[in-house]
Image (cartoon, helix red, strand yellow):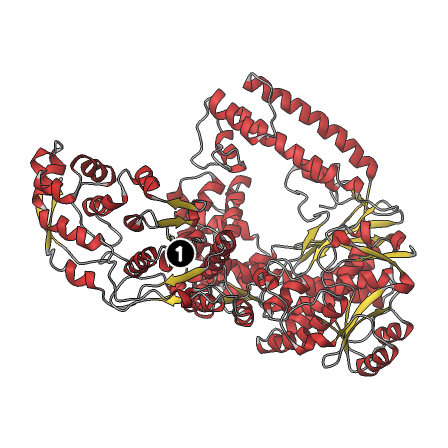
Amino acid sequence: MPTKPPVFLLDTMSFIFRAYHAMQRSRPMSTRSGLPTAATYVFVNMIQKLRKDFAPHYFAAVFDVSGGVFRDAKALEIGTLRRWSAKEQTFVEVAYEGYKANREAMPEDLARQLPYIRRALEAMRIPILEAEGFEADDVIGTLARQAAALDHEVFIVSGDKDMMQLVTDRVRVLNPQKENLILDPAKVVEVLGVPPERVIDVMALRGDTVDNIPGAPGIGDKGSVELIQQFGSVEAVLDRAGEVKRKTYRESLQQNRAAVLLSKELVTIDTAVPVVLDLAAMTTTKPDIEAARELFAELEFTSMLRELAPAASAKFTELIDDPNETQMAAFYAGARGGFAFAFSAESRSARSIADSDSEEEAVSPMQSLLDLSDAANAVALPVERMMVGVATVDGPALSMVLTDELRALLAGRSIPKMVHDWKTVLHRAVALDLVFAGAIEDTMLLSYALNPTHTTQTLADVAARSGETLAPSLAGAAHAIAALAPRLRREVAEHELTSVYETMDLPLAPVLFAMERVGVRVNLGILGGLSQRFGAEMGQVSERIFALADRRFNINSPKQLGEVLFVHLGLPKPASRGKGKAISTAQNVLDDLAENHEIARRVIEFRHLAKLKSNYIDALPLLVDKDARVHTTFNAAATATGRLSSTNPNLQNIPIRTELGREIRAAFVAAPGFRLLSADYSQIELRLMAHFSEDPLLVDAYRHDRDIHTLTASEVFGVLAEQMDKQTRSRAKAVNFGIVYGISPFGLAAQLGIPQHEARLYIERYFERYRGVKTFIDRTIEQVRRDGFVKTLFGRIRPIPDIESRNPNQRGFAERTAINTPLQGTAADLIKLAMIAIDCKLREEKMRTRMVLQVHDELLFEVAEEESDAVGALVKSAMESVVELKVPIIADISFGDNWRDIN
């Protein structure tokens, strides 16, 4: 007789709560409108994994229903309990508040996700079962019994121990959170200590604080198992309570007989609920792809959207990979009203500009075309046979050879073009000797303006978030761009982000392109000398570490280092653990040890040397071009604040506060006949705090060019300016910048090395003196709670969905983010506007000076010697006049032969 397919019954709310709590320590997930999505995302992934692992033939999701259940009335019979009072040294009578009375309300951010979880189940075509007046456990128990009676094996998908009472030879409990642990009768005995038929007896004794099932007060997990193992059942334990040796157990049983018996009724799952097993309705079918696509697009589940099959759309019949002359002629005619253009569906690969876009490569007869999905699978074609994707908004999309007619359209000033990642397109255009003119629309930058918190802005991800399927061809890429551009442009206008996009992000792309092409010159001789020096110093430091440890070991191995520090030397162990069960040797752990233990200080020193040597000193020579210049990549759509980031290599992270970091900066030099110029905004975030808060003390200090740190030291520490020492001013500086970043007493205490109560006092005094700052902070947090996002001075938005989180750590981080974003984000916008203005001026004046780097509030230029005075004045004027604030904006200008000496 053939085996019947198993039946899978999902304890849905148990799954949902586990999904919710699984993300509590992770970065919060939400849509750009602020809808929380983390629990939904994890839940869907859990269901998909379950289906992948077990391919259930019969599957249903069982829900609890709102409203009362039969256990509520049963619990009222308990009335009172007798609990042991340590104070009175006797049992005292307390009122019993009812079944599940202790349960807190469902977290608001989870409750908002329940309708979407139901929609996800419907899209996956998993039937939803529930019964009025009964809990999910009872429905599951009843259906499990019915299915088992029909000779089906049953898997109850749940992590709750309650379900173990249902286990039989045919009914199993499956716990996906424990690597798909399957509980059969033998496993129940192994896990709980009693067989399935005795589970309710154990639970009746121990009770359940979550469901407010009293049990026998004072008899916990261990005691309940021991008693049932000894006596066999609750009834037997109660009847023979006088034989129980432990006094507190014995008296609790004697004092609470009725409550224990009623507890057994409450924990017993009802397997006779009036529901009927309908296997036909539970038969799994293929998901509703369009419903899933609509839901995942609404929730912005990019990766899930990509996994769905392409939409069945008439639009895809318009993708033409080998157009004939008639089709190409039709495109040329329609393209004069504007068209989308694509080299590939993704942004450039993670290679450096020196690798992929150097002048040497630009003149090569062969050019690489990046594959749609993987830059490593590049296809090389002769320039004259280069394939590109083109599409009009309403017409067909073509994969075609780069023709002279198409070159002319690209160069046409009256013809709008739509692209994805304008800066990267410019790099490819140079390699192909293409000229772009006319208005440009960039779907990457449009998407970034709408929500800068997305971790990626590739065309595939932007298309997926917008519900637009990206077909795997150049024509598909162009079609997606043509479909996305007008839609995203409308959304940008609706969110009042047009100015951010048109005056900052879009015009900055060609400026960054030019900076990446130019690169910055590196003195290889200096780097070679530093490599030898750092290597020697690392050797000396490592020998000192070995001497202190009295043994040789691999300092770079966290495991070996942990064993030396905490086992061999017996240093105080940290509370936190590293990966797995290893003792952590992270930076904060070493910092705590460094004050009293030289070996920790030496390990910190060794790590610092090793990091600088591997990341910069030895890496930079491998990245220079034939002119000894290194070309970083500036990422204009990668940070939540609007700041630029730098990769391959990251030239924004070279330390400036340590002498070793400054030595590396000495290797960045100007070409012969040029000098380096550094232009750095002075205390720009504090000046912006003065502007936003309108605090009289701050505004007056900046208007009269007073030292803000000396002022804060006087106001907060009560130290007169003429008695100020360097250390006191440094402490005041930490307070000033700490407030900007929403620092807590704990954080300030750690930074200054003082007790928390003292740090709290400093913060309180600060707000007493700078009342405008306190008002600004409170007003900003209130506004973010109301709107779900914060804005910069220029209108750039940053969603902050976790501002109402029930998790205090997440909520605290969200509040600090809300405080800092208007300051850091506005500073980022300011320097972008300055870069655009300076680039325009340099071009207008036909100067040889070139902007080469941006490091947050600093710009670095390679200035022709004869242009030094003019460029210094031009840069200072442009940076200080970007916008008029309530306090002056100051840019400090300095020249030098290398980057170290000008700072």
Measuring 22% from the left and 52% from the top, which residue is drawn there? 267
- In-front residue for pair 767/414: 414
Give the total number of marks visible in the rendering: 1
- In-front residue for pair 878/604: 604
Residue 694 seen in this snapshot: no
- In-front residue for pair 179/415: 179
Residue 22 pos. (x, y %)? 44, 52
Against 771, residue 794 (above or below) is below
Against 766, residue 900 (above or below) is above
In the shown orientation, is residue 296 left or right of residue 670? left
Residue 368 seen in this snapshot: yes
- Rendered image quadrant of residue 679: bottom right
Residue 225 pos. (x, y %)? 23, 38
- Which residue lies under the disc numbered 1? 15
In the shown orientation, is residue 62 left or right of residue 256? right
Measuring 71% from the left and 30% from the top, which residue is drawn there? 534
- Rendered image quadrant of residue 459: bottom right
Residue 873 pos. (x, y %)? 77, 60
Amino acid type at mark 1:
Phe
Measuring 56% from the left and 72% from the top, which residue is drawn there? 290
Extreme-front residue of the structure: 1
In the shown orientation, is residue 318 left or right of residue 45? right
Against 554, residue 617 (above or below) is below
In the shown orientation, is residue 159 left or right of residue 226? right
Classify mark 1: helix, strand or loop.
helix
Residue 296 pos. (x, y %)? 54, 67
Label 1 neighbour load within 10 Å: few <14, some 14-19, many 20+: many
- Rendered image quadrant of residue 456: bottom right
Against 774, residue 618 (above or below) is above
Q: Which quarter of the image is occupied by the C terminus?
A: top right
